[in-house]
Image (tube, helix red, strand yellow):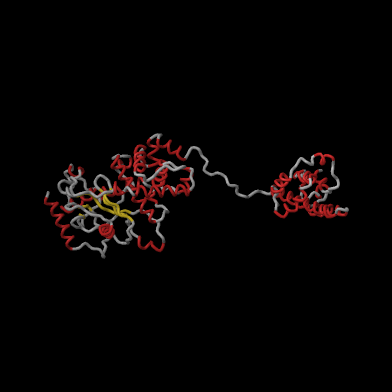
Amino acid sequence: MKLAKSLFPGSSSSTASKDEEQYTVRECMSRLKTMVRYSQELLMRALPLFEIPFKRVVFMSLDEEDAMVNGYPGARYKGFATVEEGNMAFRGIIMRQTSSANDTAILEENAMFMAVGEMLMSSIMDEDEEDTTLIPRPMHTSHHTRHVWVHKVLHGHEHRCYNTFRMHPYMFLKLRDIFVERELIRDCHYVTTSEQLAMFLYAMGHGVAIGAMCEHFQHSSETINYYVNRVIKAVALLRFTYIMLPSGTDPVHPRIHHDDRFYPYFKDAIGEIDGTYIPAHVLKDKQARYRNRKNVMGACGFDLIFHYVGVGFESAGADMTVLRRAIDVGDFTVPQGKYYLVDSGYGNAAQFLAPYCGERYHILEYQDRGNAAYKNMHDKFNHLHAQLCNYVERCFSVLKNRFQTLREGNCYPFRVQVLIVLACCDVHNFIRREHGEDYDFNLRQMDNVEDDDDPPDDPNLVVTPPDMQAGEILHTQIWAND
């Protein structure tokens, strides 16, 4: 056996002599470094031996399969039953060979062979054990995702694109082109602009976790999170383009002008104001400041376009608190001579027309009326008022139906959650202004239309007497048009 011959340096063979020049020192060093138990100390002990051609042949002739069976060679060649007995015999063989004249050389050589044998034994035993080491492997390797998947969705059936990205393909491409023209997003080496916008719309439209998006887009969570945040900020920058307050010179809205029920009574109404609740994640020590049944205020027109969106205000009061803060610090203004319709949670003022108190108001309360006459003029006014105010509820319903993350919430930082609401409203207005109608806007009966009860009055922010008087004058002027 090869190893048996190597244990006795004096027993060289003609075959070994013939192969003396077969191996170089570099080859021996390379093999030695591949051993499991390789160390710098072992290398220093082996280098003097590698200088001798015959020793190189002996070392390179070590066969792991022949050398190691159940531990040291003694367990195989001497027939010992246990590894310990074989080890003892193996060491005994080496020690017995040191009785010759060249004891020092033999000791050095046997020491090297013992070290190499120990390494070989350890290597084979490690291979027999179950390998629990995690081997790094590529994770995102699918060829049918990333930009390929986005391209197939955009150029496939339009319903597939709408279900995936919550808008029609040509609206998707138009929105992408706007971002590119304004240099808000750009192609990167591994992520195109279409894929960046797709990540944002998919995350907002379906409220999925980053881990699920990793499988769809075949990118790491860090990459997806980076580009989703980037597009959120880019879309939020469009709020001054697509979310605009109306001017005082705008004509009467067709929905009022062409309906005898509302014209000329509500000819100066430009929209409705109401609040809605969107789940938000806030640090525990700040939750008290943001606790409110309606944490987002929206002013929208009769065409379901947002005029103003107030989000991120610290308030635990009623609707009037948020409205006051929007006027004071949010640059919300109402054109002179115009007004918004509000529910009873807001005060009746010159620019905010609320329903009469003490009378029925909600749409559901009038469904069983049939052709019966109204109880009085206040009852009739409240019914017409509720029908117009239903537009803001429908506007919020379309928004939440399109973007599921606004219904379920997300775990982004609070400042990013604020931008998400603004970004979703931007996309809502973009679709409405550029396209007009789509599946969500055409839904007449919404399952999630909010019909909140009247919130309690805020005792700390009551409407001032001049505002109350101006509101009553506005009521009187409406009835004067009858």
> Could you tell me which residue is drawn at 80 percent across and 49 percent down?
75
Percent x, y of residue 193 = 41, 42
Q: Seen from this angle, which residue lies furthest bottom?
A: 460
* x and y, in percent, of residue 284 in the image: 41, 62
Out of 139 and 323, give the one closest to the viewer. 139
**Residue farthest to the front?**
51
* Image position of 361 (left or right of 285): left
Q: Is residue 250 visible?
A: yes
Tell me how many marks there are. Answer: 0
Across and down, in percent, residue 292 comes to: 33, 59
Q: Is residue 455 visible?
A: no
Q: Nearer the viewer, residue 427 or 300?
A: 427
Figure quadrant of residue 197: top left
For the residue pair 160 and 131, the one nearer the viewer reads as 131
The quarter of the picture where the N terminus appears is: top right
Question: Residue 215: horizontal and vertical position, in percent?
Answer: 49, 44
Quarter assignment of residue 316 = bottom left
- Which residue is painted at 30% across and 45% down in the image? 429
Residue 411: image quadrant is bottom left
Q: Nearer the viewer, residue 165 or 361?
A: 165
Which residue does the image show at 26% across and 55% down from the upper left?
331
Residue lying furthest top: 156
